[in-house]
Amino acid sequence: MATYIATLQCTDAPGIVRAASSAIFDVGGNILENDQFTDPVTNQFCMRSRFESEVGIEEVRSRLHDDLVQFSPALHLRNEEVHRRSLVMVSQYEHCLAELLYRRDQGDLPLDVVAVVSNHTECADLARRYDVPFHEIAIDATSKADAEEELLSLIRQYDVDFVILARYMQILSPDLCKELMGRVVNIHHSFLPGFTGARPYHQAYERGVKLIGATAHFVTPELDEGPIIEQDVVRVTHARGPNDLVALGRDIERNVLFRAVHLMAEDRVALVGDRTVVFSQ
Amino acid sequence: MATYIATLQCTDAPGIVRAASSAIFDVGGNILENDQFTDPVTNQFCMRSRFESEVGIEEVRSRLHDDLVQFSPALHLRNEEVHRRSLVMVSQYEHCLAELLYRRDQGDLPLDVVAVVSNHTECADLARRYDVPFHEIAIDATSKADAEEELLSLIRQYDVDFVILARYMQILSPDLCKELMGRVVNIHHSFLPGFTGARPYHQAYERGVKLIGATAHFVTPELDEGPIIEQDVVRVTHARGPNDLVALGRDIERNVLFRAVHLMAEDRVALVGDRTVVFSQ
Amino acid sequence: MATYIATLQCTDAPGIVRAASSAIFDVGGNILENDQFTDPVTNQFCMRSRFESEVGIEEVRSRLHDDLVQFSPALHLRNEEVHRRSLVMVSQYEHCLAELLYRRDQGDLPLDVVAVVSNHTECADLARRYDVPFHEIAIDATSKADAEEELLSLIRQYDVDFVILARYMQILSPDLCKELMGRVVNIHHSFLPGFTGARPYHQAYERGVKLIGATAHFVTPELDEGPIIEQDVVRVTHARGPNDLVALGRDIERNVLFRAVHLMAEDRVALVGDRTVVFSQ
Amino acid sequence: MATYIATLQCTDAPGIVRAASSAIFDVGGNILENDQFTDPVTNQFCMRSRFESEVGIEEVRSRLHDDLVQFSPALHLRNEEVHRRSLVMVSQYEHCLAELLYRRDQGDLPLDVVAVVSNHTECADLARRYDVPFHEIAIDATSKADAEEELLSLIRQYDVDFVILARYMQILSPDLCKELMGRVVNIHHSFLPGFTGARPYHQAYERGVKLIGATAHFVTPELDEGPIIEQDVVRVTHARGPNDLVALGRDIERNVLFRAVHLMAEDRVALVGDRTVVFSQ
């Protein structure tokens, strides 16, 4: 008995749910979870189904394809035990990477972390301790194009499903953003759309906010403007200085990024226009 | 074009989703929301579907019934615009009733409040101001059986779907609890299962908890033990005395009860064994 | 025995706490609460002390003044039972005003609401029901200066301590903002600094945020830029449309404004530069 | 210039704050934080003051002692840079220990972890990686008294200020609890007072709660009944099984324990009767 996760996305039309549930029924499927949503702005229908079946994956895929082909969906199917493959990018701060690797080891995060890439070397030890290959790709004013070529090459080589920017302090070029659209998750250390750009905790202190936050979002060519996957905040008082906010913020950052990546790892995030549909439990 | 809400509950089996989605397809239905869950303890399958259709309610009901009859479901269908009918019971405190009536007037609560019943008269003015019939049913040591008979008579007379105990300070008899099983919602002024019984805020103060809460639950013969629908908490410090906790608690009580009642009003709560399935948005 | 609330603010210097506690000791004071903070940006020292004493208010004031005069503080003293006097401004939406008046009646808000002023008439009934004088001051393109003169006249006539903009949809002129600096609280229906300006819930929907919020802040000539007193957020999902956000937002607005006003009513908010110091319990 | 943290506790009386602030003034102290509270149940006055001074610690201590001696306070003074010394006890689960050690290394936790003690060996590697001495003290039915003697010996040898039970699965004897009263912090994996005893997440699942929590408390001879230091909760749905709750719970446990230990490390927790006074920022 295998457990499958199927996701599909297409223009909304009558009969999609019937077709999908018929296909699952025909392979003897026992539905464990089923979520669906039609986005009113884009009229995109999104569905995620998790089901058990004794039938092999190729036959299940074929049946889903045949029953749904009239709707031309983006259809994805995988065995739950075959994890998504992620590549993590970092600079000098390690707390987000540490959280992801620790959680993976604890069994909390069903995700493969196939490589760590950095423009610095501070996180090399951490990656080594968790037996994850570490690649340094230095970046300076003249080397950005080469660096991104090297990154793309690694993404292909490792057969990466998505890239996680875990406090990676470089901006990806617009071309790379477009090429990887929907496949790069970033953690921004503020409650977007407030405090875009650099030093958000210092901005937050100066503004005197009573809650600080972090935002995990897809990367797009417009800096800090990509579709939001997950956000959270924590209460602060006047007694907290900028450095306190930075320290408190590390907690929110690692928790929010973990939750966003966990959702991605379980295929719970769909991208519709500029927004996300998140099928959380 | 009408919008329907269908809920069904039955023993889990393959094909239920296919059958339901076929029936909805056959009446030209456009699914707006669809939620389902199989409880692993009881093996009960629960489903809630909200869909638009141009077909009349009797034909929709008949189609759902025919396609699903093999599963012997508890099936409920209504036009979204035909609101559920509730009867609210109170004693001396009015804040929960005030919240429900205010929200209904604001358009936040799609629910009919058909009558207010009380063993006191303090809330009569509030009910009158919102044009809701007020019935006093006094209770003393000897009159409880008569009082409950009178209540049941009102429930029948007003064709009540469910009863809301909005800080009603009397305990319903076990027989009445059984007769109304799954149809009576109570707000308990603590975070259950902590602090059952009387004066929970004073208990909370003595225990020195750092969060106080409230719990909305179905009423069963076992006091404060019924299936939980909604809970929430608020942070408190050592500086808050018992009376502060009572005042803070009023807020949580009215918010938690409102949210539970709102879920009930939209048919989002299913009862499976000793627990609830809540299809929140 | 009277209970006093004293607040003071001055440039930080050694010996202030000793001087203040000596003065309180000399009037036989029993300190119930004491909070202090020195803001590192402005070097302003803020203190709030709540204490019991059998000595009359004039003698207490005189003793505090004498012991603290060397620090040239802004010093304020009142008997706790003499409530602060507020004037509430509204337009068409009544939920924030309703919350404040309901809370005052419940005994949750130790504040006098001496008048309601509106550029519309929708809230007149609500004010009347709570026996609060209602003043309509219509505003159009040519009447703004006259309207503000009339408002100032009411503020003087009612001896108002602070003004509450409870979803008042007009912008105060820069001159009025300056004249009333630190005495006008506004509720903005977003989590500032995100979504300034109009229709913030629609902005929030388009941006796809996963939490929406509200912000209570002092009014300054720069729209939506004043020092923040209180903020809060609530989680939302992709399934919530703009109208849902508006409805959910009403809840946060009334709660956040209530909490900010409650803090003001208890003299717990100090203004230091562009930020607030909030001595919460 | 040194930064000092002074805490004092005594029966409430007029003049304590004046005396303490005079002593601090006399050593040229600049108060950075000052908190106080009188518990109405026990009439205990608690104070915490953090201040800078150029005077040496012995002279500061002497001055505080002389000015306050009439109140017979429990007085504690330390240089902020001389950290509290803690000993952590664990069994098989490592997530709480991992959090504490990681945070200490990140600079988030100003605390010395001088030793790890366990009745198992699973956490030995983790302690070694962070260069903390690891002591195995096996416990079986006959060895408990000897084991506790060995533990006490380690506490003396390492000059331990307080002991942290970081998911330590043995119950301390009543005698040991009394001997270490106020010096042992435990993390209980439920929102106390709900779900005392074993397998709280399974209890929580069966009860169908909508929020699960964790509680950090002082250890007393009555199991799970000690004074609460910190608590928190996280929302769960019907879709989460007992194992999900265990996984979600690990997060709350480590966060709540970290926050409680952080408060202890900064001398922010006072014990008054059966409750705590927590001077948080």
Image (cartoon, coloured by chain):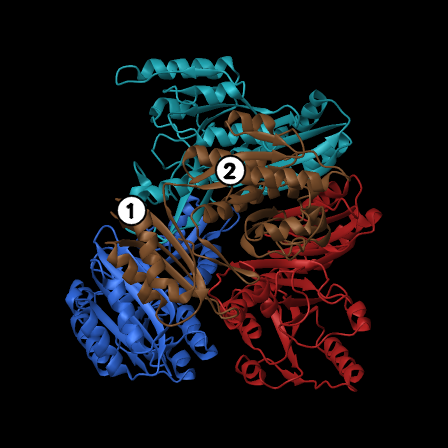
Chain colours: A blue, B brown, C cyan, D red
In the rendered view, tell whether residue B246 sits above or below residue D204. above
In the rendered view, tell whether residue C96 sits above or below residue A1. above
Disc number at residue B100?
A: 2
Q: Which of the two marks, 1 or 2, is nearer to us in this view? A: 1
Name the foreground residue: C62 vs C146: C146
Chain letter of mark 2 equals B
Chain letter of mark 1 equals B
The answer, for residue C169, to whether it is visible in the render is: yes
Q: Residue C3 falls in which quadrant of the image?
A: top right
Q: Residue at x 62, y 58 (%)?
A: D230
| Residues at discs 1 and 2 both on one chain | yes
Q: Residue C78, position in %: x, y?
A: 64, 25
In the rendered view, tell whether residue C140 sits above or below residue B182. above
Q: The disc labelled 2 sits on which kind of residue?
A: Leu
Q: Which circle's residue, 1 or 2, is located before the other in the chain?
A: 1
The answer, for residue A217, to whether it is visible in the render is: no
